[in-house]
Image (tube, rainbow, N blue to C red):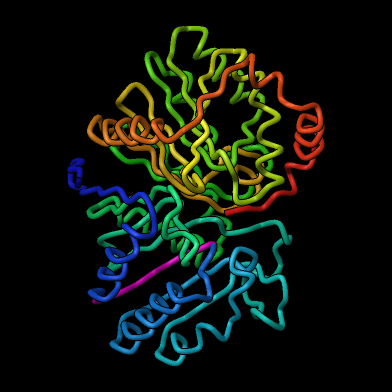
């Protein structure tokens, strides 16, 4: 169900099966520009469907700019997009690992661990898609979240795309600071760019957690929050906030699952309620506070995502959106296994040893 938020119109999509037909239709109707950043653009039937649509629109005179992360799309060769290039579109790979395979260009001088983890599509500067859903057959049925934004918010997302496409450090720095210049917006665009000591997305999470008074529900796919974030979650519980955390029961990346579990016992002891989603991979990255504010986007709560990769989240002040997210959370809880401190503390010692070892290596994990 669409939400009207000021002059913007917002819709939620939970998986690729819901998202791809709507996204493909909007691409086919593009008249001026298609600007797209994607972490995983798979070389499979879904990827081919969208690639061919981009080629058709480029041939029709639409400006097609596509930026694909070279690590996330490691299995997709540059030649996969030749039809888009021949039709007049421009395709770049962000931070190529193999220059002979993906080319160089303006992103070639970055350290290998600087990735573009964003999933941002902007069409005609009037509508945009932003969230956590990658592109490929694999993601048709994953539980995830993507927003379709139509209105002035899309224009701000178009500016965010340009800041990455141009790779201008001055623009990137300005974009990081922009969300905090005004508190009057209903939607803040939170641009996350590699910086050792500053993350606007982490700042936003800390802010909403500190302000929580009744409920704080988070649905996260790869969960390695900093000590500061964990302390704020504990403080929220101590002041009576209902803090709930939904995580995947079985991650698509085993080592990430093991490392994340290292944190559960202490969180449970502090009063955080943890639910493990079992039907499929849970890939969501969102939080909802007091039924009033929500953060939705591409960023995981971990050091890699917050300080080493390009990310984009939206901070949205809307009771209607928050209500939809809360209903989604309640719906998914029925498909979860709830953890409790006593039983979790009795898990096999070998599992605890694996968790400890992988947790120490968490800074080297890269995932979707």
From this viewpoint, which residue is outermost toward the bottom? 86
Please tell me whether residue 37 belongs to the stretch shown in magenta. yes
Q: Is residue 175 visible?
A: no
Residue at point 75% right, 48% down? 364
Residue at point 26% right, 68% down? 26
Q: Is 232 located above or below residue 46 in the figure?
A: above
Horizontal side of residue 225 vs 353, given as left or right = left
| Residue 200 drawn at (x, y percent) | 52, 38
101 or 137: which is nearer to us?
137
Residue at point 46% right, 65% down? 135
Please tell me whether residue 294 belongs to the stretch shown in magenta. no
Q: Is residue 10 visible?
A: yes
From this viewpoint, which residue is outermost toward the top? 239
| Residue 91 drawn at (x, y percent) | 50, 78
Horizontal side of residue 9 vs 359, given as left or right = left
Horizontal side of residue 253 vs 2, given as left or right = right
Give the total number of marks visible in the rendering: 0
| Residue 225 drawn at (x, y percent) | 62, 32
Q: Which residues are magenta?
A: 31-39
141 or 119: which is nearer to us?
141
Q: Is 247 located above or below residue 238 in the figure?
A: below
Quadrant of the image occupied by residue 331: top left
């Amino acid at each position: 169900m669409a939400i009207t938020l000021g002059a913007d119109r917002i819709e939620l999509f939970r998986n690729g099966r819901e998202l791809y037909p709507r996204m493909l239709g909007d691409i086919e109707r593009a008249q001026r520009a298609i600007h797209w950043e994607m972490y995983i653009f798979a070389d499979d039937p879904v990827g081919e469907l969208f690639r061919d649509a981009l080629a058709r629109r480029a041939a029709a005179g639409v400006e097609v700019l596509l930026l694909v992360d070279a690590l996330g799309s490691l299995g997709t060769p540059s030649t996969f997009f030749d039809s888009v290039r021949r039709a007049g579109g421009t395709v770049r790979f962000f931070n190529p690992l193999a220059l002979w395979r993906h080319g160089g260009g303006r992103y070639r001088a970055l350290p290998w661990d600087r990735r573009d983890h964003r999933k941002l599509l902007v069409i005609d500067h009037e509508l945009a898609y932003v969230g956590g859903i990658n592109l490929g057959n694999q993601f048709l049925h994953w539980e995830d979240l993507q927003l379709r934004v139509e209105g002035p918010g899309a224009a701000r997302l178009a500016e965010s795309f340009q800041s990455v496409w141009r790779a201008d450090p001055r623009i990137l720095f300005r974009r990081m600071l922009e969300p905090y210049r005004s508190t009057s917006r209903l939607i803040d665009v939170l641009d996350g760019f590699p910086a050792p000591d500053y993350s606007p997305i982490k700042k936003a999470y800390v802010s909403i957690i500190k302000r929580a008074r009744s409920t704080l529900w988070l649905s996260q796919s790869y969960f390695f929050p900093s000590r500061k974030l964990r302390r704020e979650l504990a403080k929220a519980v101590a002041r009576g906030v209902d803090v709930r955390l939904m995580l995947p029961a079985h991650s698509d990346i085993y080592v990430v699952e093991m490392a994340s579990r290292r944190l559960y016992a202490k969180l449970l002891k502090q009063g955080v309620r943890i639910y493990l989603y079992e039907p499929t991979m849970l890939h969501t990255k969102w939080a909802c506070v007091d039924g009033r504010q929500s953060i939705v986007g591409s960023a995981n709560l971990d050091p890699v995502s917050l300080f080493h990769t390009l990310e984009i989240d939206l901070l949205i002040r809307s009771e209607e959106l928050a209500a939809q997210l809360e209903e989604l959370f309640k719906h998914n809880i029925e498909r979860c296994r709830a953890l409790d401190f006593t039983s979790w503390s009795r898990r096999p010692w070998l599992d605890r040893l694996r968790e400890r070892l992988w947790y120490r290596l968490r800074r080297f994990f890269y995932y979707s």
